[in-house]
Image: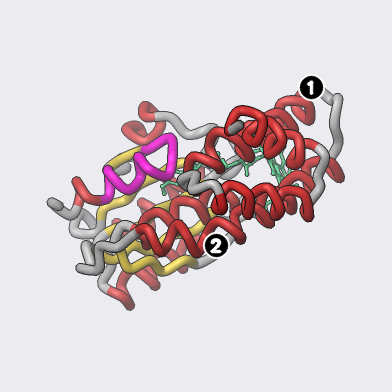
Amino acid sequence: MSADLFESMKQSVIDGDEERSAELAQQALAQGIDPLVAINAGFVLGINHVGEQFGVGEMFLPDLMLAAEAMKAAVAVLEPEMKRRGTQREVLGRVVLGTVKGDIHEIGKNLVAMMLSASGFEVHDLGVDVPFQKFAEKAREVKADIVGVSALLTTTMTGQKTVIEVLDDMGLRPQVKVIVGGAPVTRSWAQEIGADGYSEDAMGAVALAKKLVGK
Ligand code: B1M
């Protein structure tokens, strides 16, 4: 039953059991479950639980790291199917994406990259801990339509504002649109810093990107 499978997925991430997470991801594919549903209804619940427990001092950094590895192992199994399902091949636009300087959280950013790419965007993923200037340089180099800046820490969110300022200084705005996201980011923060859009999840980021390029 899917409910049991989703519960096992959640538990495998809480346990930091990489092998089990990958195995459960395989099972989901074998059962024809949409990979994004497996992520959102299963694995993400596990990582959220670990995050909450970490926040209240019930779990510790090693638990967080093991959970992240388990989550990544599951996503690695599901990724090819996510890509395969993105049958649309017309390039909708170019997106430069990264997690901002000082921040090494990559799981959410990777999901956003995967969904954008599966939906027909050309994605230039700069990785994590990306210097502000690098977003702008890459945007100029590849003639990006959109720059996407992810931040998971309240201390690194301000870097999203700096990226917009650097883009402004380089004369790349308003042609290059900026979208922001990450757990602590809100719509009002996005408005405050002059971003063109905010999304709370990967599917929302795709809808937003399509809107911004007029598709
Ligand atoms: Co970190 N961490 N962490 N961590 N970690 C958080 C973010 C935290 C909330 C945990 C907590 O205390 N409850 C907390 C931040 C507190 C705060 O700032 N308010 C925290 C902390 C404190 C830290 C350290 C400082 C811990 C320490 O060292 N003492 C440290 C900082 C390191 C650094 O970056 N400099 C740290 C380290 C780590 C690990 C390395 C162990 C690991 C990351 C591993 C990796 O990514 N390879 C980790 C993890 C796993 C987490 C939690 C548990 C999970 C993050 C995650 O992957 N979520 C997290 C708690 C939580 O958020 N529940 C936590 C799953 C992912 C699918 O969701 O990333 O939100 P998310 O992405 C979503 C949306 O936000 C959105 O779409 C995604 C898909 O739906 N989205 C976008 C994301 N980016 C987007 C961009 C867009 C649009 C949408 O457009 C561009």
- Mark seen at residue 56: 1
Taken as a whole, is the magenta stretch helix, strand or loop?
Answer: helix
Going by the numbered disc 1, the residue's amino acid type is Val
Residue 66 % position (x, y): 80, 48
Can residue 65 be seen here? The reply is yes
Residue 207 magenta: yes
- Between 168 and 103, the residue placed more toward the observer is 103
| Quarter location, residue 12 | top right
Check the image and report above or below for 53 versus 11: above
Q: Is residue 171 visible?
A: no
Number of the front mark, 2 or 1 = 1
| Dot 1 alpha-carbon crowd within 10 angstroms: few under 14, some 14 to 19, many 20 or more | few
- Magenta part of the protein: which range? 199-209
Q: Work out how far the residue at label 2 is from the one at label 1, CA to CA, in angstroms.
A: 29 Å
Residue 3 coordinates in the image, percent (x, y): 60, 28
Q: Pointer 2: what residue?
A: 130
Mark found first going from the N terminus, 2 or 1 = 1
Closer to the camera in the image, 91 or 152? 91
How far across and down, in percent of the image, does residue 48 sit? 65, 32
State which quarter of the image contains the N terminus. top right
Q: What colour scheme governs how the chains and residues are painted in the rendered image of this protein?
A: secondary structure
Q: Does the residue labelled 1 lie within 8 Å of ligand 1?
A: yes
Q: Measuring 44% from the left and 39% from the top, which residue is drawn there?
A: 201
User: Within 10 Å of the Cα at label 2, are there few (<14), some (14-19), or many (20+) other Cα atoms?
Assistant: some
Q: Are marks 2 and 1 in contact (CB under 8 Å)?
A: no
